[in-house]
C-alpha cells in the first residue's frame, strides 16, 4: 500500500471517530472550521507547493463564493446549491481571465499582483453596500438541498468532513497523475519543463483556477454555516493565514496542508489564556517552527525519520 493511501485512510479514520471525542458544540465548531480551512489549504498547496506559484489574494476567491451564496439566496431567493455552483462558476471565470497575465510574472512581482487582486476584490465587497451590506456585513440563509436543510453542528461536521476527504483524494490523484508530475516539473524548472514539451502556461492556469474554485466552494459553505458574513472573510489577513497554513504544514505535502490548518486554527484558541500576549506568543511559535522545521512540519519530520531509518 502506498504511503499516500495509508495517509488518506488514516485521515478518514480520524474524521470518522473524532465526533466521539467532541463533547459540545464549541469543539464541533472548531472541527468544522479546521475542515474548511484544510480543504482550502490543500487546493492552495497545489498552486504554491507543487507548482511554485504564490498567491496572496486567495481570500478574494473565498469571498466571491461566500457573497455569491449570501446574495443570491438571501436577496434573490435562489436555491442554495444553485447559488454555490454560480459562485464557483463566477470564480472560475475570473480566475481564468486573470491567470494568464498574472502567472506570466515571477517571484515578488507575482506576489504583488495576486495581492493586488485580493485587495481589489476585498474593496469591491466593502464598497458595494447595496449588495454586500458593506462593512456591516449581511445575514445568510441556511443551506437547503431538495427541501433538506443543513442545521446543527453534527450535520455540518459530516458535510465538511466528506468535502475534505473528497478534496484530499482529488489532490492525491492529481499529484500521482501525469498532470501532477507536470506541475512539479514546472516548480523545479519552468524552462526545463518547456523543453520537455509541457505547456507550462496551460498547466499553471488550470491549477490556479482549480485552487480558486475550491476556495470559492468552501467560502459558500462557510457563509451558510456561520449565517453571517463580513468583508474580513475576503481580507488580506485571511489570505496570509491560508498561505501560512500551507508553508507551516509543508509545501508540496497534501497532509502537511491539513496539519497546518489544524495548527493555525487551534493555536489562537489555545493561546487565549495569555490575555493580550497571545499574538506575540503565536508569532514566536511560528518563528521557532520555521527555524527548526524549515521545510514545514510534515516534510521536515519525514526527512528526519527517513534519515534515522537509513
Image: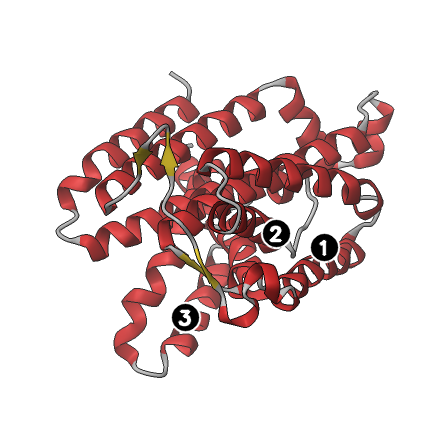
Q: Residues within 10 Å of mark 3 (few under 14, many from 20)?
A: some
Report whether 42 appears left or right of 47.
left
Helix, strand or loop under label 2: helix
Asked if 52 appears above or below 274 in the picture, the reply is above
The total number of labels drawn is 3
The quarter holding residue 8 reads: top left
Q: For this rendering, which residue is in front, 160 or 295?
A: 160
Q: Which tag, 1 or 2, sits closer to the chain's start?
A: 2
Percent across and percent down for residue 33 are: 36, 51
Q: How is the image coloured?
A: secondary structure
Is there a contact, CB below 8 Å, between mark 1 and mark 2?
A: yes
Q: Position of residue 84 (x, y in %)?
A: 51, 38
Q: Which residue is mark 1?
A: 114
User: What residue did someone put label 3 on?
Assistant: 282
Q: Earlier in the sequence, mark 3 or mark 1?
A: 1
Which is nearer the eye, 21 or 51? 21
Asked whether 74 or 124 is in front, the reply is: 74
Task: Please give the residue where the numbered disc 2 appears in the rendered image.
Answer: 58
Amino acid at each position: 500500500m502506498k504511503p499516500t493511501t495509508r495517509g488518506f485512510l488514516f485521515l478518514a479514520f480520524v474524521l470518522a471517530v473524532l465526533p466521539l471525542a467532541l463533547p459540545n458544540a464549541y469543539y464541533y465548531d472548531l472541527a468544522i472550521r479546521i475542515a474548511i480551512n484544510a480543504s482550502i489549504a490543500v487546493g492552495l498547496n497545489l498552486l504554491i507547493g507543487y507548482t511554485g506559484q504564490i498567491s496572496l489574494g486567495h481570500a478574494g476567491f473565498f469571498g466571491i463564493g461566500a457573497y455569491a451564496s449570501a446574495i443570491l439566496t438571501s436577496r434573490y431567493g435562489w436555491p442554495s446549491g444553485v447559488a454555490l455552483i454560480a459562485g464557483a462558476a463566477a470564480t472560475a471565470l475570473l480566475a481564468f481571465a486573470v491567470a494568464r497575465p498574472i502567472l506570466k510574472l515571477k517571484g515578488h512581482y507575482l506576489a504583488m499582483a495576486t495581492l493586488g487582486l485580493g485587495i481589489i476584490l476585498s474593496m469591491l465587497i466593502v464598497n458595494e453596500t447595496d449588495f454586500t451590506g458593506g462593512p456591516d456585513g449581511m445575514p445568510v440563509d441556511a443551506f437547503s438541498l431538495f427541501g433538506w436543510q443543513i442545521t446543527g453542528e453534527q450535520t455540518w461536521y459530516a458535510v465538511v468532513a466528506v468535502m475534505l476527504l473528497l478534496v484530499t483524494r482529488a489532490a492525491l490523484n492529481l499529484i500521482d497523475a501525469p498532470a501532477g508530475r507536470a506541475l512539479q516539473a514546472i516548480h523545479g524548472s519552468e524552462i526545463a519543463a518547456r523543453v520537455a514539451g509541457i505547456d507550462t502556461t496551460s498547466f499553471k492556469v488550470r491549477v490556479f483556477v482549480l485552487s480558486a474554485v475550491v476556495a470559492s466552494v468552501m467560502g459558500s459553505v462557510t457563509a451558510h454555516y456561520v449565517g453571517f458574513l463580513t468583508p474580513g472573510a475576503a481580507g488580506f489577513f485571511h489570505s496570509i493565514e491560508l498561505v501560512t497554513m500551507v508553508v507551516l504544514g509543508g509545501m508540496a505535502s497534501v497532509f502537511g496542508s491539513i496539519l497546518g490548518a489544524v495548527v493555525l486554527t487551534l493555536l489562537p484558541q489555545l493561546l487565549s489564556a495569555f490575555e493580550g500576549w497571545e499574538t506575540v506568543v503565536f508569532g514566536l511559535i511560528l518563528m521557532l517552527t520555521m527555524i527548526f522545521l524549515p521545510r514545514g512540519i510534515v516534510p521536515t519530520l519525514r526527512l528526519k525519520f527517513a534519515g534515522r531509518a537509513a
